Image: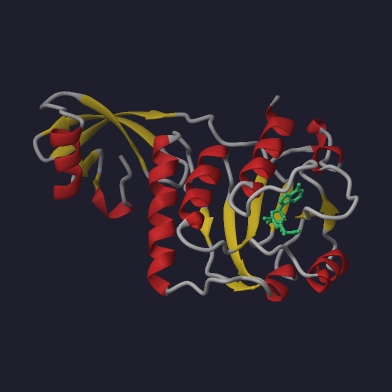
Amino acid sequence: IAIAPAQFQQDQILLTPQQLHYLGRVLRLREGDRFIAMDGMGKWWLTQLTGKQAQVLETLSVTTELPITITLMIALPKGSGFDEVVRCCTEIGVTCIAPVISDRTLLHPSPQKLERWRRIAAEAAEQSERAFVPTILEPVAFREALSTVNGHKYICEARGNYPHLLNCLPNKGQMTNDSELIIATGPEGGWTETEIANAIASGFQAVSLGRRVLRAITAPIVALSLVTAACEV
Ligand code: SAM
């Protein structure tokens, strides 16, 4: 379960009513049972349920993070599609998700959405045993976001004869802790020509994800899966 720093009292964790409910009613844990707690910022502990608290028994080392950082810059898809993108990309290993408003973005999200996406990311990180919960940034205009990122930058484009992402990634040996990859994927209607041109002018390389046209919520999942395979296999 995920623990906030304020819940610690030396090596005891003061559990909230919601956490106690989850441990007792959902997981069916009883006094003395052990479970794993994490803070979403790199720390994991083996703990033991003692009354309304958990006793920290051991600090665990977690090796589930990718050796590189990946930012997904994604034009907000319509409906609840973004929830699925956040969940799946967190499981795959994304470091940061930067939702952007593009020329053809249909959705302009309410502030409550950001809270919801962050909660989904936290749950997915817990489920997939990530050490870190990805950061979800506030949505900004695509042209503004272009100048805020540094690293190996790729913009996925379904049309045009662009090289495949797999052929443009750094070699596995070059993907280290300092490597930063930025992958941009477009909305249902695709990027405009101006957006592609602006991205290229900002140092992005236009890439293909294969010959088929993927849905706006499938493309980021495919792109991240390819990157993960390239740096882990
Ligand atoms: N009608 C749009 C077009 O022709 O560009 C299709 C857009 S697609 C549904 C949504 C986004 O997914 C695209 O903007 C692109 O970023 C990404 N995408 C989908 N299929 C892709 C592919 N085969 N290669 C690269 N990017 C792709």
Which of the image's four quarters has the N terminus? top left
Q: Is residue 26 left or right of residue 173?
A: left
Residue at 53% over, 29% down: 63
* Observer-nearest of 204 and 68: 204
* Observer-nearest of 81 and 24: 81
Indicate the colouring scheme. Answer: secondary structure
Q: Name the quadrant where ligand 1 sits.
A: bottom right
Q: Is residue 129 visible?
A: yes
Point out residue 96 in the picture as x, y percentages from the top left corner. Answer: 58, 54
Vertical relation: 33 (above or below) 215: above
Q: Give the quadrant of residue 43.
A: top left
Residue at 38% over, 45% down: 123
Point out residue 86 in the picture as x, y percentages from the top left corner. Answer: 50, 51
Q: Is residue 16 left or right of residue 133?
A: left
Q: Is residue 16 visible?
A: no
Point out residue 200 in the picture as x, y percentages from the top left corner. Answer: 86, 64
* Observer-nearest of 30 and 176: 30
Q: Is residue 148 left or right of residue 26?
A: right
Point out residue 9 in the picture as x, y percentages from the top left corner. Answer: 22, 46
Residue at 76% over, 38% down: 175
Q: Is residue 201 left or right of residue 29?
A: right
Which of the image's four quarters has the C terminus? top right
Residue at 69% over, 31% down: 229
Vertical relation: 50 (above or below) 205: above
Q: Report the number of numbered marks.
A: 0
Q: Give the quadrant of residue 26.
A: top left
